[in-house]
Amino acid sequence: MTEFIPFDEVMSQDPPAFDSSVALIVDSQSTPIELRQGLAHIIKSLDHVSLYHSHAIPVQNDNVKWFLSFQNDPNLDLGQYSMTPMDQTYDIMIRYRRTIDAFRAVGKLLGAAKASLSPFGDILGEVPSQQGSEQAEFVTQGVMIDCSRNGVLRESRVKQLLCYMALMGLNMLQLYTEDTYEVEEEPLVGYLRGKYSRTELGRIDDYANDLGIEVIPCIQVLGHLGQVLQWPQFAHLRDNTEVILANYEPTYEFLEKLIKAASGTFRSKRIHIGCDEAYGLGEGRYRQLFGYKDPTDIFLDHIRRVMEICSRYDLEPMIWSDMLFCLAAKNNTLQGYYDLGSAPNVNDRLPEACNLVFWDYYHTTEDVYEHKLQQHHDLGCTQPWMANAAWTWSRFWTALPFTFQSVRASTVASKHSVSGVQHAFITIWGDEGNECDMQVETSNTNTCHETMLNLLFLFFRFSALPGILYYAQLGHCKGDQVDISILKHDFAGICGGRFDDWVYASKIDDAPNGHAITDKSHYAPNISKWLLWEDPMLGFLSPQYKDQDLEAYYGLLADELMMKKKDAPENGRLELPARVARVLSLKCHLRDRCALAYKQDDLATLSDLVHHRLTALQQETDALWQCHRRLWHDMYKPFGWEVLELRYGGLRTRLATMHHRLSQYSDDEDKGDGIPEFEADLQPLFFGSTTNLLLDYARVASPSRPG
């Protein structure tokens, strides 16, 4: 039993073997028809898994073989499957109630195969002696992935994600699309943003259906519409820059187009209509046009109008629940959502058919979630949805240790019968540019030599996968019992990576000597991001880490990640955090060292720093940029990369200017006005926080505000 997964505990156990000595064989002819296409998708899409059709076993494959057969058993409970050895051989019968549970069973067998054990705990080669079985704790357990923060996943990558989800037993996908979907007669919705066509979304839905996964449209009908409202053609629909104008007929005509387009390509009748973080509701053009009205009343009136649209299309809407609490608290912050002492008094005004989604990505103890879920009951919502998160946003690699803690707390609380939670999902956000690794890698090779040359393009992976799998495991066990050794083997078998190494990469945001700021809402700092984008000449955040040896820390981390990348082909994904760490090992304290040499008039040291360390930093920055560019275009549509490339362009230009000015100063006899930037006395800006900061690009690129 684990309360959470401590970093040291994760890293302390022996890693699973990667050369599987077991092959799983399925007979497509005898397999139930509802599984055939899904199994074919998995075999074709995930070429690293040891799963084969009986007619297509590799000629040289001399592995021990487990022959799988399947039976749909209506006597099983919903969400249950069992695996039984047949006739004292390695013929294994999988009985299942739902399609997704059959694929979950296959995923467990892939993990057992990677562990070189039988699925029932015996040594490979011995006759299995036990039956394996699991029971899903939720009716719906799935993933929501952000396709609105510049990065729109390619269709092929969504399909590969669906295969991973199926093997984990996750049966619902939401593609979060604020504006990145095709809307008839509205060309500026998703304009130059890589929006999905109706055809693409239809193919994704068909593919998911083959795997037993429901795809639910996830859009916005109130806030988070700034990408659309920015254009002059939609100026009449603005309340403010992000929030659409409520109580205005053209607004509801436009929203009906959005709802019809978003829902029209999917089998599901459920739809997520957002409505979170609608800050400033009723305080912009609404107030100018209609006068003051209590924002809670505006919100509820708007929800009722949108619900009427949904009912015309027989849709079952859900909304994020935060605004109900924030408006009542008159506090548009996380504290307004989480710390309100009692549920807002809106029971009689909230439409009964409106499902509420409680989202909390920050807390690490169950009692906080239990209290807030009870408040949702008090609102009249007896079966709230629960959304937690893999910490992917505003960073280059998922903060996995914190993800494990917050996901464990929310999921365990949701499994208590009093919570009423039957539907849950983990979110993967891409705020602040979608910098976080979510790379898909695809093998297109034919020979061993070509495979070694193309390790970076071997198969789909992204850094949130360990968190997603942990979440799936929690959804298929009682209490909080997740066996870490089995988790690692399952990760190797399903995802093809080494669990410990992926968790280790999270250390790029785990610099020493950080301090927690609050014991209520926790967060994972993103030190690697703000260190990378911090202006190199000004170094105005360097007082935050002046007493920490980040040069050595990141140098060692870069070396270790590059070694781990080579240990197994599946670890090629570690190149990005390794390159980030290498850049930071050269960039951290560089400004301090240059300023010290300048103040001491040590021109020899200054020149050496410029021509060696600064030059090396420029080279490593270029290598990181090129690596990131390659990974982005393999994962996402090209639209949106320009946002990140402008950041790289800015950093590269500032480094070039720094090189030019310092070279000129150290080489010329005429020192002119000196280097005023190095004469400034830098001040600590976030007192007491050291490196425990979560900062965005705009905050760290310059101390000056544009405009």
Image (cartoon, grey):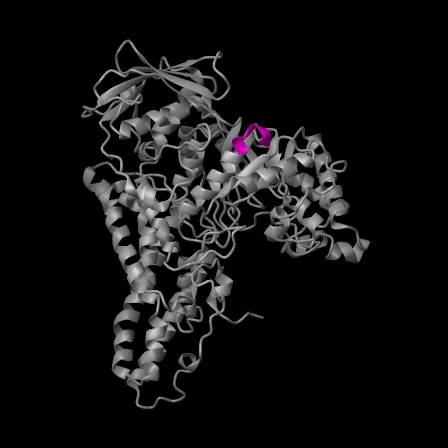
Q: Which one is nearer the viewer's eye here, 637 or 105?
A: 105
Residue 347 as seen in the image, left or right of residue 633: right
Residue range highlighted in magenta:
414-420
Residue 527 as seen in the image, left or right of residue 314: left
Residue 117 placement (x, y as % from top left): 26, 25
Where, by quadrant of the figure, is residue 472 drawn?
Answer: top left
Q: Residue at x 23, y 25 (%)?
A: 58
Q: Residue at x 31, y 35 (%)?
A: 492
Is 217 within the magenta? no
Q: Which one is nearer the viewer's eye here, 31 or 474?
A: 474
> Is the residue 598 above or below the residue 574 in the image?
below
Instruction: Report whether residue 575 is seen.
Output: yes
> Is the residue 228 above or below the residue 158 in the image?
below
Residue 45 placement (x, y as % from top left): 36, 32
Residue 480 placement (x, y as % from top left): 44, 33
Residue 449 as seen in the image, left or right of residue 237: left
Q: Which one is nearer the viewer's eye here, 669 or 231?
A: 669
